[in-house]
Every structure is written in structure tokens, then in C-alpha cells.
Image (spheres, coloured by chain):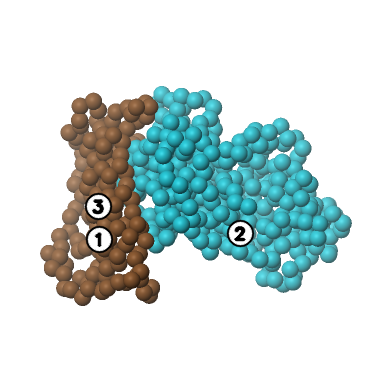
Amino acid sequence: MVRRPAAVVWNLDPQKTEQRKKMTTGMRGLWLTAAVATLFAMGCGELGGTDGGSNACSTDANCGTGKVCHPILKECVLSCTSSTDCPSTAKTCARYDGTAGSASAPGFCQCSTDQLCNGGSTGELVCSAATKRCENKCTSNSSCPSGFTCDTASGQCRGGGSDGGSDGGMDAGMDAGVTCNSNNAQPDVCGYGSVCTASNTCEAIVDDRSCPNIQNSGRPAWTSASTGPVIFNVVDEADDQTKCTQDNAFTVTVYAYAGPGSTFPAMKSNLPGFFYYTTNGTAVDIPSNLLQQSNYTLYGNTVMGAKFTLCSTSTTSIVAGFGFTNGNGYCAMLTR
Amino acid sequence: MNRYALLSVVAAAVAFAQTAVVEKAPIIRADHKLACPSGTRQVGGPKSNLQMLGCMKLGPEGQRQFHGPMISFYASGKVEAIGQADEGFRTGKWVFFDEQGIKAGETEFLKGDFNGRRVFFNPDGSLKSEENWVKGMRQGPQKTFLNGVATITEYKDDRPVQK
């Protein structure tokens, strides 16, 4: 299935990843996000999802009925066979390697964004890249699973690795077909037009035309045969009101990887064809009008992050369109 | 080495290597005046919040838009780039400097896209690479230089041409 991978945390660079306020949601997911807030009272399940008592395990066989062995926690956790088994805060039923949970190979409920973990808002929970569950932000290495270290800026536990296959693939998916490594520069082995998700699976990117900003822009269609930079993630940041003297600030970071055989320049003023589109489809040259050199970050020379602020009279939210020349369109809703 | 990546290797001793000149970024003071077009006003400065010095006006939808000469700065206040904008889009030749103030490259823009010649320089001022762009796509010969020897790759529609 081809879908827009907007609501997934990508580990661009564990050492440099900025603390994230909230992930943007795709236009199709906006209403789901709003609904999540009311459903949050159902609980996060996974925070207390171990079965108490003797939870230690190394394979699923060590766990009782309705539980699987979490390969990072080495604890039995509640299992699922489809998303209907999962709370709205962690709606993906999958094994650790990202394959969908099923009756024959149950998974566990996995989160996708910090925002959803916190019931559609901000809070003290993060969607842990290590465990793929909603967890309290770590404050020290001791609050992380064995082999992981705490990134206190983001509250995420970083590092760790596979169990080396020592359990013969008998846990909740750690050994099974990891197809890419989300700690590597995007798109890792996934190739142009795709992205490596936090679950280490390749996912196709689509030319997002779901918002009027892109629809009215006159941008040519983008396909995986195109050559421009690919926007693979947009993060709705804490708003920097100092950038807007009269209107309301909507601060965002756009992440993209370069096209085949291309690199991003060291200087933001030399960054070509990078546009924000207003609702009417009017293009705004981001590097010359919005972006500061100090907010232009390179990860290697093929992945970049551009943090900038849009100013609007809206007091609640705006819909924004982004795109590079010969790259994909990307719609995002930014909220205050 | 890809067959098509290197169409030819030109073993030519290039005269530019002997005449290379290291160009330095100008020092821009806080009271620097730009020749702003009518209808715009000068905003920013070397250590301003904008990290930019330019001529601003409001666009058709009320958005901030630069029009006229522009200078972009590093957070240190040193010049990052000098160029100009046309109705909010980078246009014409822009010159870029690294944080040490050494000229790093020149790029020709049109409507915010690369359009024309784009060159990079080594720290000694010699030419490092030379590209040709048309509306955001590499077209024609793209050259990289090593010790005065140019490696040329032919491009069409942003892709190397296989011959």
C-alpha cells in the first residue's frame, strides 16, 4: 500500500535530532488526531502493558496466552493480531520488525508519534524509537533498556541493536527481515522515492496533492522517476513567536533527502528550488525569505533539515504546502 | 567507476590554476546601506534576527518578500552570500563565502532555481567544479577539476547521459 509517511518518527541522527514538539499529520489523519484526544482516557496500555510478576522472557514461548516477548525489553507484553486490538495512542499492531501482527504471528501495539502518545497534545510521553511504545521520557541511562543510552534532550533512548539472532527468531519480530536501518541517512537502502520508517521498513512516498496549496501551485507531477529532492518528513515545532511581529508564528522543520547523484549545499542561500506554497498556491522561496543559515542543518550532505517560521493571522492552525523543484509535494497542518 | 559517469577525461593543464585568486568576503557594518528599489524598505543587518540584509516589501498575499539586493549572514555576522531577489525569488548571480570568509562559489538563479553557471572554488581560489543548469535541472557538460585536470560528465534533464 502506498501512503504518505507523515506521522512516523525517523531517526535522522540520534546525536543531533532536535527535540520535537509534535509530528505533523497528513491531511487524511487530521481528524483522527483530533479524535485521539477524546480517546486518550482509554489509556496507553503499553506503559503498564507487561503482565506483572515474572515477565522476563527471551522468546514468545516464555510468555503466557495473549502475550509476546518484547525483544528490547525482554519482557512479556500484551499481544495483538490487528489494529482493532490496540488503543488509539498506539494503533499499529506489528511485530518489532514492522511486519503486521496476525493470528499466527501476533505483534504488540506500536505507537507512531509523540503527539498521539500524549492524546493528541504535548506531554511527558514519547513514542520510543527503542521500544516502539509510548514511554515516559528518559532522564538517565538507567531509565532505558539495557544497551541503550538516554538522549535527555529528546527523552528518547538511543542505540542498542538486535539480539544477533540468538533467539532463533522466536521473539516478537526482532530477527525477522529488517529491510532498512532508520539510523542511516535517508532513504538508506530504500532508494529514491521511498523512506526508511522508524520500524525499519521501506515505505513509498507519494506526491501529496491533498491540500489546495499544492493543488493550486501548478507544480508538475512527481514520480519516483523524478530527480529532485524528496521531502520525507515535516515536524511541527514549538512556535517561535519572535519571528512574527504582528501575526501568529507557526514554526516547522522540513526534512528532505537529495535526488540521485546530488547533494545539498553547505550554505542555505545556495539551496535551490525550495518553496512554501500558500493556500492560493503562491510559491515563496524559502531560503531567501524564511530560512536562516543557523537553522539549516545538514546530515552528511544528502539529507537536510530546514527550520523556519510561517506567520499567519490564524490563531489555531494553518495548512502549508512544501516542495522542491522536481521533487514531491508535501502538505502539512501546523497548529499552535 | 560508472561508464557513463565519466564521458571523457580532459588532461589539460588549466591556466586558471596559475591565476587563481582567493577572494574574501566583504565586511558589512551595521549601518551598511543597500540600493533598495522604490516600494521597498531596508531591513535586517549583520547580526539581526533575520541574519539577512535586504529590501523588503509585502507580496500580493501580504507575505514578507525580498526584492532587490540581498546579503545573507552567518550567526557570527560574517557574510554568507551576496546576491539579489526579484519579487521574493533569488535571481541573477549569487556569490557564496564560507565561514572563514573565503569565496566558496557562485551560482546563477532564476525564480529561486539554479539557472545558468554554478561554480565552486577550492580554498586556494582554484576552480573545483563547474555546472550548467536550466530551470533547476543539470543540462550539458558538468566539470570537476583535480590538479587542473577536468573530468566532464554530460547531463540531459538532470541525468547523466550514457553514450
Compute the Cα span from label 3 to label 1. 10 Å
Compute the Cα span from label 3 to label 2. 40 Å
Q: Which residue is mark 2?
A: A200
Q: Which residue is mark 1?
A: B130
Q: Nearer the viewer, residue B10 or A174?
A: B10
Report the residue at 38% width, 55% height from top.
A264
Residue B24: x percent and y percent? 19, 53
The answer to the question of whether label 3 and label 1 lie on touching residues, with beta carbons closer than 8 A, is no
In this image, A127 relative to A293: left or right?
right
Residue B14: x percent and y percent? 16, 69
Read off the chain for label 3.
B
The correct choice, above or below, for A33 with respect to B130 in the image is: above
In this image, A88 relative to B58: left or right?
right
The answer to the question of whether label 3 and label 2 lie on touching residues, with beta carbons closer than 8 A, is no
Q: Nearer the viewer, residue A140 or B40?
A: B40
Residue B30 in view here: no
Residue B86: x percent and y percent? 26, 37
Q: Which mark is residue A68?
A: none
Chain depicted in brown: B
Question: Mark 2 is on which residue type?
Answer: Asn
Q: Secondary structure at mark 3?
A: strand
Question: Mark 3 is on which residue type?
Answer: Gly
Q: Nearer the viewer, residue A183 or B13?
A: B13
Q: Secondary structure at mark 2?
A: loop
Q: Earlier in the sequence, mark 3 or mark 1?
A: 3
Crowding at label 2, few (<14), some or many (≥20) Cα neighbours within 10 Å? many
Q: Which residue is mark 3?
A: B116
Report the residue at 23% width, 25% height from top.
B39
Crowding at label 3, few (<14), some or many (≥20) Cα neighbours within 10 Å? many
Report the residue at 35% width, 64% height from top.
B160
